[in-house]
Image: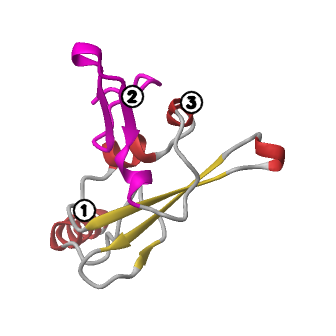
Amino acid sequence: MRTPAGKECAHYYQDFHRGRDVQECRLEKANPQSARWQPGDCSKCPVPDILLANADPDMQLTLTIRPGFMGFFRRLEVVATSRSDGSVISDPYVGKGKDSPALDLFRKALEDTDHD
């Protein structure tokens, strides 16, 4: 669904049908340690870009919103973990990468063309 910032995000939900007024980030809602989500947070959120760059079904994202100094300058922290082994993924835009057989084939093909 399209966020208030204009990006597509699978974790954003809104419903304004027949007088309803529901806007929520379901990713933040799943994290009880996060501050409450506000529609303005979508403009700074890296999750839509991560989902666009990496569609790994094994990757699980956790969003934590932390209020800044005196309630200003809210920070959004995203942690990506692997669902299969629970390890933290250092770069969620790329994913695990090392364990991908397709990526290994691609690297091998690149090495073969470099020697020619």
Q: Cα distance, mark 1 to mark 2?
A: 43 Å
Would you say 111 lies left or right of 40 here?
left
**Magenta stretch in the rendered image:** 1-30
Disc on res. 48: none
Contact between labelled residues 2 and 1, with CB atoms less than 8 Å apart? no
At 41% across and 42% down in the image, what residue appears?
Answer: 49
Mark 3 Cα within 10 Å, few/some/many (few <14, many 20+)?
few
Residue 116's x, y, as percent? 25, 64
> Please, is residue 31 above or below residue 99 in the view?
above
Residue reaching furthest to the top:
18
Residue 74's x, y, as percent? 68, 44
According to the picture, the residue beneath numbered tag 2 turns out to be 3
Residue 23's x, y, as percent? 38, 31
What amino acid is found at the position of numbered circle 1 in the picture?
A: Thr
At 24% across and 53% down in the image, what residue appears?
Answer: 55
Disc on res. 113: 1
What amino acid is found at the position of numbered circle 3 in the picture?
A: Gly
**SS for dot 3:** helix
In this picture the colour scheme is secondary structure
What amino acid is found at the position of numbered circle 2 in the picture?
A: Thr
